Image (cartoon, grey):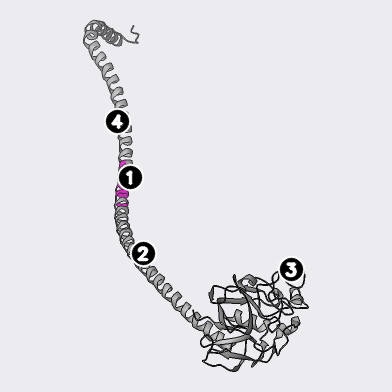
Amino acid sequence: MCYGSDKAESLSCAAIQELDRQCETHCYRVVKPLLQRASDAYLKEQEFSKLQTQVHEKEIIIKNMEKEQAILQAKFKAQNVLLLSHKDNLASKDALIEHLNADLKELLQTKIQQAAQITDCKSATTIRIKELEGKLTKCSFESRVSSCLANKTEVQETKVYDIKTFPAPCDSDLAGPGWTVIQRRKDGSVNFNRSWNDYRLGFGDPQGEFFLGLEKLHLLTNAQPHELFIYLKTFKNEIINARYDHILIGDESESFQMKSLGKYTGTAGNSLSDHNGMKFSTIDRDNDISEFNCASEWSSGWWFRKCLVCNLNGLYGDTYNNSEIKWHDSKVKKKAIFVQMMIRPKTT
């Protein structure tokens, strides 16, 4: 509707309204599709804008991923470089290990050879030491013991360890050189029915009848292995002998026990072996295993058992009182008119 103050304005408004009415039907048909298209275009534009936003976000994500990929590639490259370095180091170490194994094998072989040489040297040294020990023992013995090793038959001053020198007869006539006489019976001039102390220290005349002494006999036979030779002459002038290859006499705490005689050879018979292992007995020291004192019964000191098979310290003479110097073998009971007991250091 048109409202105006003058006629002209009213006519103009009416004209416009007429035009609008006339255009409504025709314009709508023309504009409607345009409006529809504009609406579609607007929606498309919004969708496009949305897509652009998404694309931009994706591009940002892609760029971030590309950066991460670049970082990862850089790390991967660095890891590859490190891996190659480790491989080179490992190869170098393998080569070093192989070289060291070769050196170790060579060193081990050398050590084995050295060990064999040391073993051979040790064996040779051991043999040499034994040789030197033997010489030392001999020298030591010679320094401790002055014996009858020379080819002499005379009384000689002898010394054992720290004991004062003492006269001891040497004999090289009856059984070869080097013997020290420890007992002799020849004429009955010396009484052999003596005390323990007499037999311990020795008594008699070294140039005649005598007994060297149990203490000296112990020291001599313990300083070095000795052999024993017994020379006997019977009242029938029969010469017999007995030889033992290792005599050993204990000390006084063992009652001068006859601890060893060794192997017997000779012509007299192996009578003394029955006394082996026995302690020495005297009239005042009963060490036998008899029910009575054999030393008193047989008037002498000896290594009595129960009582005797032989007794070289018995009463001198061809009597019938059963106390004579005796050496009984398995067949014959023999009485001696001459007895000489001798010891000599063993040479082997």
Percent position of residue 332, x then y: 60, 73
Highlighted range, magenta: 69-82
Kindly identify the amino acid type of the residue bearing the numbered disc 4: Val
Give the spatial CA distance, label 2 vs label 3.
70 Å
> Residue 162's spot in the image, x, y percent?
65, 87
Q: Which residue is mark 3?
A: 290
Nearer the observer: mark 4 or 2; the answer is 2
Packing grade of label 1 (10 A; few <14, some 14-19, many >=20) is: few
Main SS, magenta region, reads helix
Q: State the residue at coordinates (32%, 29%).
A: 54
Identify residue for label 4. Answer: 55
Residue to which mark 1 is pinned: 71
Residue 25 among magenta residues:
no
Q: Which of pointers 2 and 3 lies earlier in the amino acid sequence?
A: 2
In the picture shown, does residue 51 fall above or below 142? above
Q: Inspect the image, locate mark 3, and give the three-letter code of the amino acid beneath it.
A: Ser
Q: CA distance from mark 3 to mark 4?
A: 134 Å
Q: Earlier in the sequence, mark 2 or mark 1?
A: 1
In primary-sequence order, the first of circles 4 and 2 is: 4
Q: Is residue 190 left or right of residue 103?
A: right
Q: Nearer the viewer, residue 217 or 126?
A: 217
Image coordinates of residue 101 in percent, x first then y, are 33, 60
Q: Tell which circle, 1 or 3, labels the residue nearer the N-terminal end.
A: 1
Residue at left 30%, top 22%?
Answer: 47
